[in-house]
Structure formats: C-alpha cells, structure tokens
Image: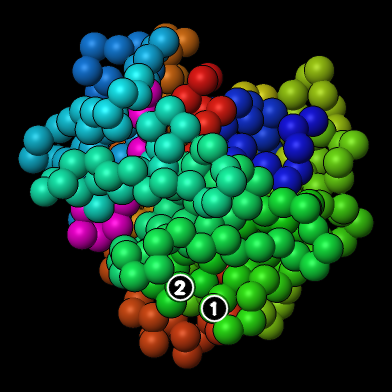
Amino acid sequence: MTSITNLKTIVKSQVKNLTLLLGGTAAMSLGINASAMAAVMYDVTELGSLGEPFSYAYDINDRGEVVGYFGDYLNRAFLWKSSTGINDLGTLPGKDNSVANGINNAGKVVGYSDNRAFLWNRNTGMVDLGTLPNQSSSEAIAINNQDWVVGNSGNRAFLWNRNNGMTNLGTLGGGSSSSAADINDAGQVVGNSDNRAFLWNETQGMQNLGTLPNKDFSSAAAINNLGQVVGYSGNINEYYRDRAFLWSESTGAIDLGALPGRIPESPDDTASYAYDINDAGQVVGVASVPYSTAFLWSESTGIVDLNTLIDPNSEWRLNVATAINNQGQIVGYSRFGSFDYRAFLLTPKSPQSVPEPMTIGGSIIAGAALLYLRRRQYGLSQG
C-alpha cells in the first residue's frame, strides 16, 4: 500500500490510479435545505486533449474555468474556458512536464512542472515557487482567493504567500512527515501527517482530526469556506474498506457509507473516497460498482451515482469526480467510448443557487476552525 503519509498526494495527483474505490451513503443532520441538492440532470462536456490520448481535470473555480493536464508520455498543464476551450500552459524553463492542480476565482493556477511548484497567471506565465530549505522538489496543490498556495516540498507541507514565501507547516506532534491538500479563504489548511488527517490554522497550528471508528488512518482532501472537511479513513492492511468522511467541529468525522454493488474479485469492497466539497455541502468523489464510479453526495439525497444523472444514451462512463464549484458544476475524468481517460465538465440542466455562507451557517453544524486532495502530485505526471 502506498505510504499513508503521502495519501494527499495520491488523492490529488494519483487519483487516476485509485480504481478500486466505493462510494458512500449517509444519514446526517447538517441542516442543508433539500433544494440545495435535488436529483438534477447534468449536461456533459468533453474538455478535449489537444490531440493527445489522455486528459484529466482536477479543479474548477466559480467562473467555470477548469485546470488539469493532458498528454501521454509528456504531460502538459491546461486551462479550459468555455470561450476558448483547452489551452496549454506550457512548462517551467528547462522542464518537460507540467500538471495543474488548482485554480482560484481570479484564474490563477498552481501545480508543478517536473519537480518544481509553480504559480501561473496570464500576465506572468509560470513562476517557480522554489522549495523548502534543504529540499530538492516541490509541488503546489491548491490556491485560495487570497492567492495563498499550499503544497508539498520533500516530506513537508508548505504554505506560500507573496509576503512570506514558502513556510514549513510542520507535522502533528512527534510526526515525521506531512502533506497539504487544500486551503480555504480563511487560510485553514487540510492534509495528512503520519496517517492522520489534519486541520491547520495560523494561531493553533495542526489539529489532529482523528479517524472513523475502527479505522487506523485518515487523510483530508478538501475544506470549504464553512470549515467542513472531506477525505477518507481506513485501515492500513485493508485495501477495500476505506470510507469517505465528512468532518465538522461539532460532529467529528461521519462515515458517508458505500454505494450498492461489489466487484466480484473483491466481495468485501466497501470503499469510498471523497475529494471535494463546496459551500453548500455537496461532496464529490469516486466509488467502484464494479468499476470506478463518480459520485455526488448531499445531506438530502445521500450518495448518488453520477452516471444516473446524465443522458442514459451517452457514451460516457463517469469514473472519477475530482472537484465541484459553488454553482454545482463538477469536473473529473472518465472513459469515453474507449480506454482513454478524458476530462469532463458536468453542468446542471437546472442550476440551483448555492446559499450564502451566512444562510447555510444558520442551519449547518460547521466547525469554525477546520481543515485538500485537491490536487496533485509528482507521481501523477508519471502515470
């Protein structure tokens, strides 16, 4: 099994290798209005691959701009817009590959080019963010709307901003490693450190978020602006029973359950992995019933196979949902008429407004201090 200390890296960048996954169903009482997630149908848009066989979408902002990578032997970070389509973001000077992991509402993109973290915008192009002291590599995973960036350098999570450069976030007490997965607009960071999901903030440092009952590790993938955290928790020696969780300060980690179905060769497979959450509390991730299956979860509906919410005559088989924005648009990657993965965008046919944070806050049990996998790691560019 891959090192648990690098689970965030798996979740955001090697998500494509997680094909043995199972989604979950839950009974929670977070108080989200049922209209926030009704059973809606989605239009599917293929984002393209500029002639290459593969493309993977990893993040989407509230303007509907999508980032990820396309390629085959060499990979290139892309930015997709509805007005321009897919655009190659290039690489850092002297580098061969690049992967885009995150984008904020200003259209600024983070990722990595070979072994260096980058920040991209349309005025400067790619800028190398460097590394932590005595480290030779780095990758940027997520960026918030204040242009704060989180990622990993060597075996440490970092936070970068223009004033302070790259700061080592340390580890949970006595730990040896950490990796960051996401950051919200309040500057709260989530990830994992030595087999435990963490929530970091500037005043308190790292908080251990624990595990689900009877589990011995956890990894946090994403945090929304209400301080709700999603990820997964499991046992190191059980490969098919990891479970998606949703964490808040009031409730702790709650198991999101599993979709019906089993894979014949693994009858005990009840795994699920949550990768992102928006401010309405909608969660997306991946399951396997019997193939890897993209899912959408909300308090009002529980877990839903996204393949049941698109045209049944479509050639699409939605495998992995990696991100969801506050308009309910979802991105991920999927097989489409072949064995080549292609990036997709799902847009609700009847978009439903997302309650403002204060409105949600009146009914959601959300933790103030909270904690990505959004998104990616060096290993992904090699896959």
Kindly check if marks 1 and 2 are in contact, taking CB atoms under 8 A apart as contact.
yes
Q: Is residue 144 left or right of residue 239?
A: left
From this viewpoint, which residue is outermost toward the left? 83
Say whether residue 383 is magenta: no
Q: Position of residue 369 (x, y in %)?
A: 58, 80
Residue 31 spot, x, y in % from top left: 55, 79
> What's drawn in magenta, residue-wise?
97-107
- Check disc 2 and give the amino acid type: Gly
Residue 127's x, y, as percent? Answer: 27, 44
* Residue sitting at x 70%, y 73%: 207
Position above or below: 41 against 84: below
> Is 291 positioned to the left or the right of 124 in the image?
right
Say which quarter of the image contains residue 201.
bottom right
Residue under the image location 55 percent in, 51 percent down: 133
SS of the residue at dot 1?
A: loop
Picture layout, residue 48 above or below residue 151: above
| Residue denoted by label 2 | 187
Q: Nearer the viewer, mark 1 or mark 2?
A: 1
* Whether residue 121 can be seen here: yes
Q: Quadrant of the N terminus?
A: top right
> Residue beneath label 1, please?
202
Q: Amino acid at mark 1?
A: Glu
Report the coloring of the rendering: rainbow
Residue 118 falls left or right of residue 258: left
Residue 101 is one of the magenta-drawn residues: yes
